[in-house]
Amino acid sequence: MPPGQGSSGTLGSIGVDFKLWGRDTGGAVSIVEHPFPVGALVRPHLHTREDEYSIVTEGEIGFRSGDREAVLGAGGYITKPRDELHAMWNAGAVPARMIEVISPAGFENFFHELSELLLSVSQPEVSEIAELAGQYGLQFGQPDWLPDAIARYNLTPLPE
C-alpha cells in the first residue's frame, strides 16, 4: 500500500484510513490509521474478539487501558488487550495520528460499516450503533475516570 492510498471514512470523533484488510493478511491482522482532530475522544470500549496495538505517528495521543494511562508522542507504542476497557484522545493542541494493528483481523469491517452508516444518516439511532457493535463483540463503558480526562485534556464531551 503506497503512502496516501487506501479508502478513508469517519467514525464520528476520529477518522479511519484503511491500509490492510484481513483478506490481505489471511485473517492474521488488519491495519488502519486514525487521524485525531484536536479535542477528539474515542468512547471507552472493549473488544471481546481481538487485541489492538497502537503506534503514534503524529502529535500526542492519550490512552487509558484498564488502569494504565499514558500520553504518547510520535514513536510511542501501547497494547490494548481484548476484554480490557480502553479509550483514546488527542492529548495535544495539534492534530494527531496513529496506526492501529488489529489481531486477528475482522474488526476493520466494523469501522467500514460504521463509516457507511454515518455517511448515510447524519445522526444514527443509538440502537443502530449498539446493534452493529454487538455483531462485532464490541461493548461500551462509562468509567468514573472519564469526566476527569475530559476536563484535563479539554476534550469534546461525548453525546449521551
Image (cartoon, helix red, strand yellow):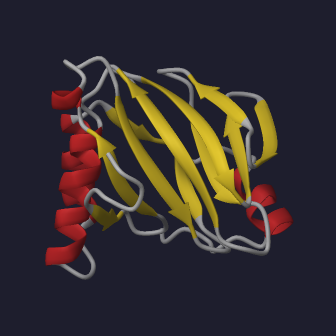
Question: Residue 22, image x and y in percent?
Answer: 22, 29
Residue at 67% from the left image edge and 31% from the top image edge: 78
**Residue 37 sits above or below residue 23 on the image:** below
Question: In front: 112, or 139?
Answer: 112
Residue at 56% from the left image edge and 25% from the top image edge: 84
Q: Is residue 112 left or right of residue 101?
A: left
**Residue 126 sits above or below residue 113 on the image:** below
Q: Evaluate whether residue 45 shows in this view.
A: no
Question: Residue 160, image x and y in percent?
Answer: 48, 68
Question: In front: 116, or 147?
Answer: 116
The residue furthest right is 152
Q: Evaluate whether residue 120 shows in this view.
A: yes
Q: In this view, does 22 lie to the left or right of 40?
A: left
Question: Residue 110, image x and y in percent?
Answer: 25, 45
Q: In this view, does 15 lie to the left or right of 111?
A: right
Q: Say which quadrant the N terminus sits in.
A: top left
**Residue 102 sits above or below residue 13 on the image:** above
The residue furthest bottom is 122
Residue at 33% from the left image edge and 46% from the top image edge: 19
**Residue 78 sits above or below residue 61 on the image:** above
The residue furthest front is 2
